[in-house]
Amino acid sequence: MRPSPTPLLDWRRAISCLHRWLGIAGGALFLLWFASGIVMVYARMPALDPAERLRRLPDLDLAAARVAPGEAARDLGLAPERLRIAMLGDRPVYRFAERTTWVAVFADDGRPFGSLTAAAAARLARRLYPEHAATARHDRRLVAPDQWTLQSRSLLPAHRIALGDPEDTRVYISERTGEPVMSTTRRARRWAYAGPVPHWLYFTPLRSRGSLWNRAVIGLSLAGSVLAVSGLVSGVWQAIRARRSAAGAPLGSRIPSPYTGWMRWHHYAGLAFGLFTFTWVASGCLSMDPLAWHPGTEPTAVERDAVAGGPLRLDALTLDRLRAVHAALDGDLAVKELELVQLRSEPFLLAYRPPAATPPRRGIGYDPSAFLSIVQPFEPRLVSALDPERGTFSRFDEDEVMAAARAAMPHARLVESTWLDAHDSYYYPRGVAAPLPVLRARFDDPSRTWLYLDPGRGVLVRKEERLTRLNRWLYHGLHSLDFPFLRDRRPLRDAVVIALCLGGILVASTSMADGWRRVGRHLRRLAPRGR
C-alpha cells in the first residue's frame, strides 16, 4: 500500500504561522486594548456635567422678550426640530435646531446671535464661573476639533477658556449658541488618555477623519479576531499533540504543552482566555456595524413626528403664553431653561429642577442635539403652552402616551404594553440616562418592533427591533459584559471585567518576547555579512 502523499501545505503549520506573525504585528495593540479596557471600567471621556451646566445657567427672564419664537424662526427661514429658551448674558435667547445645526436668536429683537469674540467668551465664562473670575482667561479659538470636541463638531467654532483653578479646568463655549458645550479637567484628560482614547483609537489626527478611522478600527478588529481564532485552533492542536506524545510518560509529566518558558505561559493563557479574547475583539468590531446588518435604535423621523403629531407648533407660542408658562413654573422651581416638547399636536414647555448635588456620571456629556436624552434623572416639570392655567405636572397621562405609541406604528398591531418601573435587558443606561417609568410597547410588524416612550417628556426614547436585540447581546453583552446578572452588581461586574482583561494582558504579553526574538533572528539572517 502506497503512503499518502505529503500535502503541499500543512493547514496546521499555516495556521500556526498566521497566528505567529499576526501576534508579532498586533501583540502590542492587544496589550493596549486590554489595559485601557481596565481603565474604562472607571473612567470615560471628559464631559460637561448636565447638572453642573443647569445649575450655573442664569435664571430665565422673559421680561425683555419682544419677538415670539415662531416669528423669529419664520424670519430666518427655519423649520426647527428643537427649541430651547434660555439666557445669553442678560438677554433671553431662542436656540433652534434644524437637523444637526443650532442657531441662536435673541428674543428681544429677533436678530441672530453673531460671532463670539474671544473677550466676550471670556466674559461669559466668568459669569458662569464667578469663583474663577479673577483667573479665567481665553486659551484658544477652535475651528477644527481638538481631542475633546471630536463629537461636538456641529457646535464649532468654539472658544476654550482656562479657568485657572487647581484642577486646570477648561471650558468650551460655542460660537454658534454662546453656551458651554464641554468641560475638561487635568485629571479627566489624563485618565482619558489612559483609557478611552487608546481603546477607541480616538487620536485626533485619525478620529477627525471619520471614514479612515472607521476602516482602521474595523480592519484591526477583524485582524485581531483572526489572530484570536488561529491561536485557539493552534493552541488546542498543540495541546492534543502534547497529550498524545506524553501518553506513555508518568502522570505528573503529562503536561499538554510542547513549549517552555514564556511560550508555555502563553499557551496556557491562550487556552484559558482565548475564547474570551476572540469574543471581546469580535464584539468590539460589531460596535462599528461593519456590514450594516441591523438598524439603529434611534426612532425614525416619521415615528417621532407621529408621536409629536406633526412639526413643532411654534405659532402657538405667543409671548403672552410663554410668560404665563414661565409664571406657572416659577412658582415650582427656579427656571433656567425651557425646552419645547409636543405630544399628539399639543405643545408643552419642559423645565427641570437640577439636583442639589450629583456624583460624576461616567461618559455622560452635554450635547444640545440630544438634549432630551441626557438631562434625566432631573425632576421634570411640564406646562401646556395652550392652557398654562392648568399648572405644572410631572408626567403625561398614560392613555395619551399609549395613543402616541399606537400612532408611531399605525400599520402594526399592538400586542403588548407594559409600564416599566425597572430597566429591562434592552432599555438601561449606556452612557446616557434611561429615565423611569417608561412605556414599553410591542408590535407584530415583521421586524417585531418594541418602542419605549418616556411619560415625563412625551418622547420616544428608544426603538428595538429583532436584529437590534440580537446585536445587543452580540455587542454589548460580549464586549461590555452587561448581562442582567452582572450589570447592576458592582463591584462584582468590575472584578469579572478586570480579571478577564488581566487574562488578555497575560495572553498578549507572554508572546511578545519570543515574537520579537524571532524577528531579530530573521533580520540578522537577512543582514549582509561582512567579508
Image (cartoon, rainbow, N blue to C red):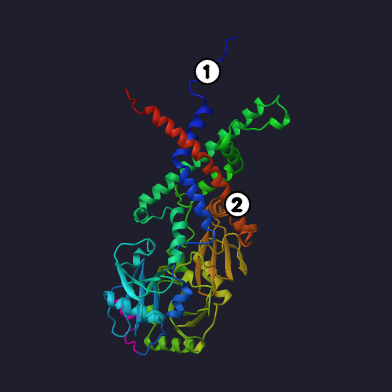
Image disc number at residue 499 = 2
What residue is shown at x 40% (from left), y 47% (from top)? 216
Mark 2 is surrounded, within 10 Å at the Cα level, by few (under 14), some (14 to 19) or many (20 or more) other residues, namely few
Give how far across and how far down residue 128 sits, in percent: 39, 80
Decide: is 302 above or below 353: above
Q: Is residue 240 left or right of residue 214?
A: right
Residue highlighted by disc 1: 6
Front in this rendered view, residue 412 or 329: 329
Front in this rendered view, residue 401 or 270: 270
Callout 1, which amino acid? Thr
Work out whether mark 2 precedes mark 1 in sequence or the reverse, and give the earlier one. 1
Q: Is residue 349 left or right of residue 235?
A: left
Magenta highlight range: 64-74
Q: Say how many tags the image has.
A: 2
Residue 86 visible (yes or no): no
Give how far across and how far down residue 179 sits, in percent: 36, 75
Q: Quadrant of residue 326?
A: bottom left
* Residue 65 among magenta residues: yes
Looking at the image, which residue sits at the far right?
251
Marks 2 and 1: which is nearer the front? 2
Front in this rendered view, residue 427 or 447: 427
Looking at the image, which residue sits at the far front?
531
What residue is shown at x 46% (from left), y 73% (from top)? 50
Mark 1 is surrounded, within 10 Å at the Cα level, by few (under 14), some (14 to 19) or many (20 or more) other residues, namely few
Mark 2–mark 1 Cα distance, whole angstroms, equals 44 Å
Decide: is 499 above or below 137: above
Quarter placement of the N terminus: top right
Q: Secondary structure at mark 2?
A: helix
* Residue 292 among magenta residues: no
Quarter placement of the C terminus: top left
Callout 2, which amino acid? Ala
